[in-house]
Amino acid sequence: MRLLFILLIHSVCFGQNPPIDEFEKGVPSSWLGRYEGQMEIYSSTGLQQIVGVQLDIQIMDRENYWIYNMSYLSPRGEVLSTKAYRIVYDETNKKVWMDEGDSLLIEMTRMGNCFYDHYELSGMFFSSSLCKQSEQLVFELTGGNTKPSYSSPFIEEAEGVVETMRVNFLQRAVLKKQ
């Protein structure tokens, strides 16, 4: 039964159906602007901290490049620090990349009304999403250790085992357009 479900999901996701392109190339123009909100930071034991954040997404003068700056705010609204990135649309390969600088590129996938990425760094996995909901953006980042916390017994239909990795943290912010 599990094998049939996996095959169904695979055929839906990777079948020969033409893609429905709901986005402009790269970042949709309706996403551009300044957004503000509160980022909730959780560990496996619960809410650890709430931090004010500001996200700026702006088109650059260079074609297929966007500014993506996440600023962390003091309780009085002053910018304490900013993580400055660029989003790049690769016209040749039809891919979107988050450029973190120093040659660090993370591929972003557009599905539905969201950007997703998943990557590994220094023995940790990270998964993030940025989704447009009405006039808001919802940002989520999760991660944990890549070493499996559990391995299932051998599953014949899957011809292997399932290894799970515990999610150790969540950063979540609902950002309202300013």
Image (tube, rainbow, N blue to C red):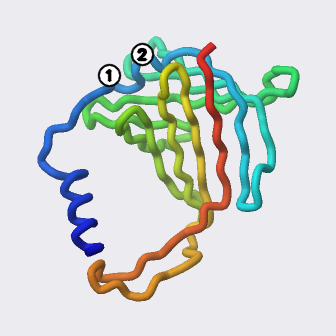
**CA distance for labels 2 and 1:** 8 Å
Residue receiving disc 2: 29
Is residue 132 visible in the rendered structure shown here? yes
Which residue does the image show at 32% across and 25% down from the upper left?
23
Q: Indicate which disc, 2 or 1, sits on the residue closer to the N terminus.
A: 1
> If the image is split into quadrants, where does the C terminus sit?
top right
Circles 2 and 1: CB distance less than 8 Å? yes
Picture coordinates of residue 91, whole percent (x, y): 28, 29
Q: Quadrant of the N terminus?
A: bottom left
Residue lying at the far left of the rendered structure: 16
Position of residue 37 measured from the top left corner of the image (x, y, whole percent): 69, 27
- Residue 122 seen by the camera: no
Q: Secondary structure at mark 2?
A: helix
Left or right, 11 with respect to 165, comes to left
Three-letter amino acid code of the residue under disc 2: Ser
Rendered position, 116 above or below 9: above
Q: Which mark is residue 24?
A: 1
Mark 2 closeness class: few <14, some 14–19, many ≥20 residues within 10 Å: few
Specify the farthest residue to the front.
Answer: 1
- The residue depicted at 55 percent of the width and 15 percent of the height is 33
Name the residue located 57 percent from the left edge and 73 percent from the top edge: 147
**Which amino acid is tagged 1?**
Glu
